[in-house]
Image (cartoon, helix red, strand yellow):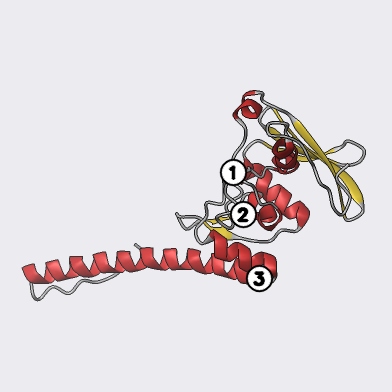
């Protein structure tokens, strides 16, 4: 049981201390920065029994699938793709409302690693580089966004508005590019015939 306020796991090198800690996050879809090659080669299945808001749940990772069950072992939801399927459902379950934009400008729900970023520091990367203990913290400006969100510095509505603003800026940029193309076309027409006066039919 890992529900005590403080737990110390003691053992020599290679006894699996890190494997136990990383297994807490693995069934939830959070990917630690470094996973032992033997552990990865073993295709280990894992289950995490936890309590949330007074109720017991079990998160399972097995055969490339993630699933969440209630106390009666009823399936609540599942998914194979962490970013597109499992992550958004888990975020809704935990009330995690951080929304970000990817490098293409699309609004995305960050992977589960963003939920647990402040709560896990590994011995490989986390000691020397903050916000690097999980391997999939890849979205732009992740470190500052995580610090602001988890400290409560900004409300949830701020991140939703910021994501929508980024989408609107991309749409505006595309419209400005279209307007620029039309202006170039009109200038070329007028260079051929100075008297040309293009007309516009909004229906067409």
Task: Tell me if residue 107 comes above or below residue 158 in the rendering.
Answer: above
Which badge, 1 or 2, is on the more N-terminal residue? Answer: 1
According to the picture, the residue beneath numbered tag 1 turns out to be 33
Instruction: Give the CA separation, mark 1 to mark 2.
Output: 20 Å
Instruction: Give the CA separation, mark 3 to mark 1.
Output: 30 Å
Q: In which quarter of the image is the N terminus?
A: top right
Task: Tell me if residue 71 comes above or below residue 62 in the rendering.
Answer: below
Q: In this rendering, would 157 be left or right of 56?
A: left
According to the picture, the residue beneath numbered tag 2 turns out to be 109
- Residue 137 image offset from top left, x and y in percent: 56, 51
- Residue 116 image offset from top left, x and y in percent: 69, 53
According to the picture, the residue beneath numbered tag 3 turns out to be 157
Which badge, 2 or 3, is on the more N-terminal residue? Answer: 2
Q: In this rendering, would 97 be left or right of 190?
A: right
| Element on which disc 3 rests | helix
Between residue 152 and residue 13, name the one nearer to us.
13
| Element on which disc 1 rests | loop
């Amino acid at each position: 049981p890992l529900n005590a306020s403080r737990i110390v796991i003691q053992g020599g090198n290679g006894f699996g201390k890190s494997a136990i800690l990383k297994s807490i996050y693995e069934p939830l879809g959070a990917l630690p920065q470094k996973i032992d090659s033997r552990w990865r080669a073993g295709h280990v299945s894992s289950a995490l029994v936890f309590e949330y808001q007074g109720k017991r749940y079990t998160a399972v990772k097995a055969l490339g699938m993630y699933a969440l069950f209630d106390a009666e072992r009823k399936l609540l939801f599942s998914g194979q793709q962490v970013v597109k399927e499992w992550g958004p459902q888990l975020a809704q379950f935990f009330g995690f409302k951080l929304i970000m934009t990817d490098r293409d400008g699309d609004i995305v729900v960050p992977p589960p690693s963003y939920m647990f970023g402040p709560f896990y520091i590994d011995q490989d990367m986390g000691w020397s580089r903050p916000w690097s203990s999980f391997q999939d913290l890849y979205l732009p400006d992740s470190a500052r966004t995580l610090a602001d969100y988890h400290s409560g510095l900004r409300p949830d509505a701020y991140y939703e508005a910021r994501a929508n603003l980024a989408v609107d800026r991309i749409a505006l940029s595309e419209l400005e590019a279209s307007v620029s193309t039309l202006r170039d076309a009109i200038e070329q027409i007028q260079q051929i015939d100075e008297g040309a006066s293009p007309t516009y039919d909004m229906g067409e």
